[in-house]
Amino acid sequence: MNFKLILTIAFLIQISLSAFSQEKFTLSGKITDTNTNESLISVNVIIPELNTGTTTNEYGFYSITLPKGNYKVIISYLGYAETSETINLNEDITKNFNLTESVESLEEVVITENVERLNIRKPQMSVNALKASTIKKIPVVLGEPDVIKAITLLPGVTNAGEGSSGFNVRGGAADQNLILLDEATVFNSSHLFGLFSVFNPDAIKDLKLYKGGIPSRYGGRVSSVLDIYQKEGNSKEFHANGGIGLVASRLLAEGPLKKDKGSFLFGGRSSYAHLFLPLFDIDNVAYFYDLNTKLSYKLNDKNNIYLSGYFGRDVFRIADSFDNTYGNTVVNFRWNHLFSDKLFSNMSLIYSDYYYGLKLNFVEFDWDSGIRNFNFKYDFKHYISNNFKLQYGLNSIYYKFNPGEIEPSTPTSGINPFKLIDKYAFENAIYLDAEHELSDKLSINYGLRLSSFLRLGQDELNIYENDQPVIFNEDLQIYEKAEPIGTENYNRSDVIKSFFNLEPRFSVAYQLNKNSSIKASYNRMTQYLHLLSNTSSPTPLDVWTPSGKYVKPQLLDQIAVGYFKSFNNNDYSLEVESFFKTIKNRIDYIDGANLIANNAIEQVILNGKARAYGLEILFKKNVGKLEGWIAYTLSKSEQQTTGRTAEELGINNANWYNTAFDKTHDISITSNYELNKKWTFNANFVLQTGQPTTYPVSQYQYAGLTIPNYGNRNSNRLPTYHRLDISANYTPKPNKTKGWQNYWTFSIYNAYNRYNAASVSFSENRITGINEATKFSLFGIIPSVTYNFKF
């Protein structure tokens, strides 16, 4: 009923607005790449006479309504040659455009100025976009282009250090990021425990990171949204490209299923460094592989279908005693339908699965765990007028959580089969987003998301006295597990606990002049899933758990304000943003919490709160032989868990303490210099405040041993982190555009061989009997070379 009401309101708005614009007509269509027929996202469609324009959506569709008349339409997109055409708009017109990649950077003052004015006028803020070509230029460890490593060079984005998985946005935890690949949720974004990401840069078409002012169509996480779309494939002719590196290689092939109507894309990557380990008498194995695929087909002018998928696995083995396999599987079927030149829709059926398997041969048992979901989405974009656009839709997700299952691996194993209780949940949402241009200077986005979460029945649920699974021992002044007083059993269709939340979103932009604007945003978001991890960064063994009777959903409120300016016809740009956010019901852990194979996880967690605030500066040089950006973030991220009664101490004596991802200062400098057509050079420098940690503050003797006594949580820091990465690309035949084309990438990670501390451990010196601090570093200087090709 609610969804029908949204549709009714939307159509009534359209009818009422059309009464005032009888002499207006709509220009709409798709914009694609001339050579591949690939749809292009966020292409600028400019109408200079009216100083207005629009952009294409995620599927290359645009629509703009104008008064009757003759207009020059300019199509502009970074990396492509601009095109223009004069159109006599005396009726609704469908017009498709094809863009050709530009060999050289062409300057057109009027076009550049209008494009930048459109961006400055948009209310959307706290968004960063990166192209695959930009990602491939950034030097990374072991020479493999990496999406996650690239976004950590943006303001407000960090990770937990070298070799750590995930990323942190504006002081949030890694599990608070919604990661989407072709609209499907990816639960673990890392290969080889953080050395690589799961995203093949050759298969990526578009990437956007939303840090704040997040539109209502997104939900389920409280920190950020990383929205990645794969390429659709070349529907004109067959092409392939790839790279051969020292530790990993990749290959991507694309071509037509039916020329100009259908296309396929298949991509694969694999690491193979483990193949050389036997040469050094090392019997260990560590490698990954993944596959990307996408099929696209144009049924007619109004209907397109897509089938995309991803499959990835990591294998980590230590001799014959330990075997670890984990990875993601996602499949998505999508149907685009154009109801009219003003109403675009997309329906998606999505399956997503994260699997974690562990074989411990020395104790003769196998362990399996994971999370699986089935997702239905139906989204609409309604171009009601040139100044007013609506997006609305619904989303339903069914979850199955497998916390863990143990099976004996041999007939002689002394381990008995054991299954942690599966959990089930159903998450639903409807949303409405409006983009409203009130005047030439003032634009607003506003929306509302209504989300619900139903914790469904499970086989057994503990009951505790006063519903308190954690109790406070006043004598010992510590938190302890409460003993259950009974259990409840449910049918799968029963609802154990339900949650409903309204999530308003609002952003506004005011244009000060043609080159600058100020913006502000507010958004509330709800997160019903929690990643159980008491390490500084996620690991494959971490388990997701749903909100329920004893675990509340996280609630975020965030405000942000910013100033945006372009200089010298957009040769340079400046973005300055300040943010403040609070999160309710952030999970905290009691001292000594055991999270692995715990069937009653509620006994070791408490509900706390978190806050983060900071200032972000991004200065970019956009054109010329030297391009790049300087990003600086000054921020604070803290957590607090108070006692539930006056007698309880809370965590850390109920004081605010630094989260594990608090970085006071974060500076990154990224540059790209084109010496000539054959040689380009790239470099990035990173400097960060050391990661919070906990050091001993005293020690005592027990049974002849020296035992360290640790201080308050995260009251200390690791040493300051910094490094310099450099790379060079050499193209032997830069003017060759047909047949076999190739280039070499030479890179040096950590060029001045800085041994940054991944951790500091404390242990007793066996000779002196004194506790000593030992720094552990993961990487020194790492040179690499990759041969890249396409044909």
Image (cartoon, grey):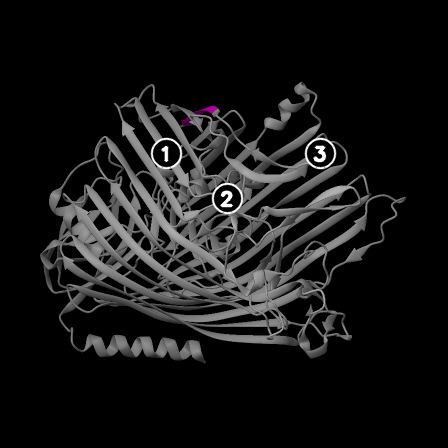
Specify the quadrant that holds the C terminus.
Answer: top left
Per the image, the residue denoted by label 1 is 684
**588 vs 735: above or below:** below
At 31% from the left and 38% from the top, the residue drawn is 35
Marks 3 and 1, how far apart in space? Answer: 35 Å
Give the quadrant of residue 588: bottom right
* Residue 257 in sight in this render: no
- The numbered mark at residue 166 is none
Q: Identity of the amino acid at label 3?
A: Ile
* Highlighted magenta segment, given as a residue range: 783-789
Picture coordinates of residue 680, whole percent (x, y): 31, 26
Name the one closer to the observer, 317 or 12: 317
Q: Identity of the amino acid at label 2?
A: Thr
At 51% from the left and 52% from the top, the residue drawn is 174
Name the one closer to the observer, 349 or 491: 491
Give the quadrant of residue 572: top left
Q: Disc 2 or 3, which lies upstream in sequence? A: 2
Marks 2 and 1, how far apart in space? Answer: 32 Å
Marks 2 and 3, how far apart in space? Answer: 32 Å
Residue 141 located left or right of residue 213 = right
Per the image, the residue denoted by label 3 is 318
Per the image, the residue denoted by label 2 is 293
- The kind of secondary structure element at disc 2 is strand
